[in-house]
Image (tube, coloured by chain):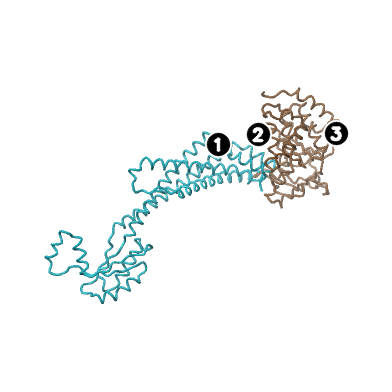
Chain colours: A brown, B cyan
Amino acid sequence: MALNTDMNLAPGPLDSRTIISFNRVSLAYKDQDALSEVSFNVTNGEFMCLTGPSGAGKSSILRLISMDAFPTGGQVRVRGMMSSKMNRRKIPQLRREIGFVFQDFRLLEDRSVEDNVAFAQLVVGVPHKRIAENVSRVLNNVGLWGKRHRLPHQLSGGEQQRVAIARAMVNSPKILLADEPTGNLDPRTAQDIINLLFRFNDAGTCVIFSTHDHEIVKSFGRRVIVLEDGRIVSDKQRQGIVDRSVNLADRMYRADLDAAASREEPAHA
Amino acid sequence: MLSRSQAGYLARESFAGFGRRKLTTGVTILIMGSSLLVLAVLTLATLNLSNLLETARSGIDLRVFLEDGIGREDAAELQPHLVAIPGVEQAVWISAEDALEEFRTTLGEDAAVLEMLDSNPLPASFHLTLTPEARNLTAVGAIRAEAARWPQVAEIIYNQDWIDVLERWTFRFQMVSLAVGLVVFLAAIFVISNTVKLTIASSARLIQIQKLVGATNAFIRTPFLCEGMIQGLLAGSLAMGLLAVGFWFLKENLEGLVPFTPAQMGGFVLLCMFLGLAGSWAAMRKYLTLQSETA
């Protein structure tokens, strides 16, 4: 695929709605280039998909956004914080405004659903009473309040991912980074998870959704950045069936949610 | 500043490692306690030797014998010079007659043998007592050299040469104790550090999630540091307990030996807590550095 050099070099105009900005960002691990002069902006409340084959640089972009890695060239700006001027002691502060969801859920296996979600609030010092309120709210949002006392291994894959999303959302982050969140799920459950992410996006959270499955994102009707060998080869606002489907997704979500408890059997129960 | 929920969490997590790895923690405390017991025994032996040496040193004095024919006047002239030597507290004049009388008393029933002498063979002398700071081999050597400069002085006798031997052996023992202590010290840090590394390894996911949700390094580190300190506390207490039991069993054989005072025992346990803290810090520091490098 031909590279669009301009696309990689021009991040576009910065305005007050820009929440993430990559300006000619390069990243190398030892001698291997992971990203080469990548530029793009993300506005507040946007739902953006990153796609491309394994090793294309999707996870590297997510790591740069969370300042879990720092560019070897160029500048990353997240909520006004610039990577080159970032005091490392302030990174925890930034991460409190970012939620993370991963393909492998990354739950604490010895803690209940409720404790997994509460954990994210506990470590940042939210008072107990507010933790209880917030956990209840977010578990109701993801449809797992009824299973709050279960351990992760007593839940299905989809339910575990919903716990992970609840944990990511309980601190009301401005940005949600979802790294292949549907990679371990069957298509139907994957759709549930995507709908859930749409729903949080509708409520104002900026979602960066990374997947190697190009077909999934085609149907989103959202902005899609395609990466290849650490470069952006396409950055387009998709016009698709779901472009008119925020409400549809929401309706699907609600319908699925009602059916979820009966449909999803515990994986190892 | 920690919130109540954070403080509660940290307190729970500090003890959580003990519950999750009972055997490892138990073995660590046992190994560390035994190592620290060696350290405690060596410390106690050094303290007792030092006490013994101090007692011996308090009896140190020097006899400065004068040339024949030195009379009271010449001696009176010499006396202020001897007292002026740094480390000399007092210089008491003992005339030849007094010396003979003293000798007679020492001989007791055998004193009759002295009647066979035509004249008094004993010289006059000064008996030097030393300041506490000067009661050591180096200072005594300097005082001897200084006193010997005076022409009236015939010979200087250091009346307790065995103290030299004691001092040399005490010094050697202290050096060996220091070396062994240092090894034990480092070994204890190493043992604790390894145990905390195990705790850290088994808590890798927990740490990863803490970092993701915005916990500071200090917050992540605290329970592990506390765990190390608690292990140090338990190991130190075990060592002190074993030492006390040993003392109790062997008290008849150890007559005259001075045990640790409660303050010294407290200090030792505090030192062990510090060792635990240092071990955990080393493990955590390496781990968090590694984390940020791979980040």
Within-10-Å neighbours for mark 2: few <14, some 14–19, many 20+: some
Q: Position of residue B172 (x, y in %)?
A: 36, 53
Q: Which quadrant of the structure image shows residue B153? A: bottom left
Judging by the rendered image, the residue that carries numbered circle 1 is B18
Determine contact: label 2, label 1, CB under 8 Å: no
Q: Position of residue A101 (x, y in %)?
A: 72, 36
Quadrant assignment, res A178: top right
Q: Which residue in the rendered view is the most extreme toward the left?
A: B116
Amino acid on which the number 1 mark rests in the picture:
Phe
Q: Amino acid at mark 3?
A: Val
Would residue B272 appear left or right of A144 to someone viewing this image? Answer: left
> Is A5 displayed left or right of B230 in the figure?
right
Residue behind mark 2: A108
Residue appearing at x 36%, y 66% in the figure: B87
Q: Position of residue A122 (x, y in %)?
A: 68, 40
Q: Which residue is mark 3?
A: A246
Local secondary structure at mark 1: helix
Q: CA distance from mark 1 to mark 3?
A: 50 Å
Are discs 1 and 3 both within one chain? no
Q: In the rendered image of this protein, does residue A197 appear above or below residue A91?
A: above
Host chain of mark 3: A
**How far is the residue under mark 2 from the one under mark 1?**
18 Å
Output the chain of dot 2.
Answer: A
Q: Secondary structure at mark 3?
A: helix
Image quarter of the C terminus of chain B: top right
Closer to the N terminus: mark 3 or mark 2?
Answer: 2
Depth-wise, is mark 2 or mark 1 nearer the camera?
1
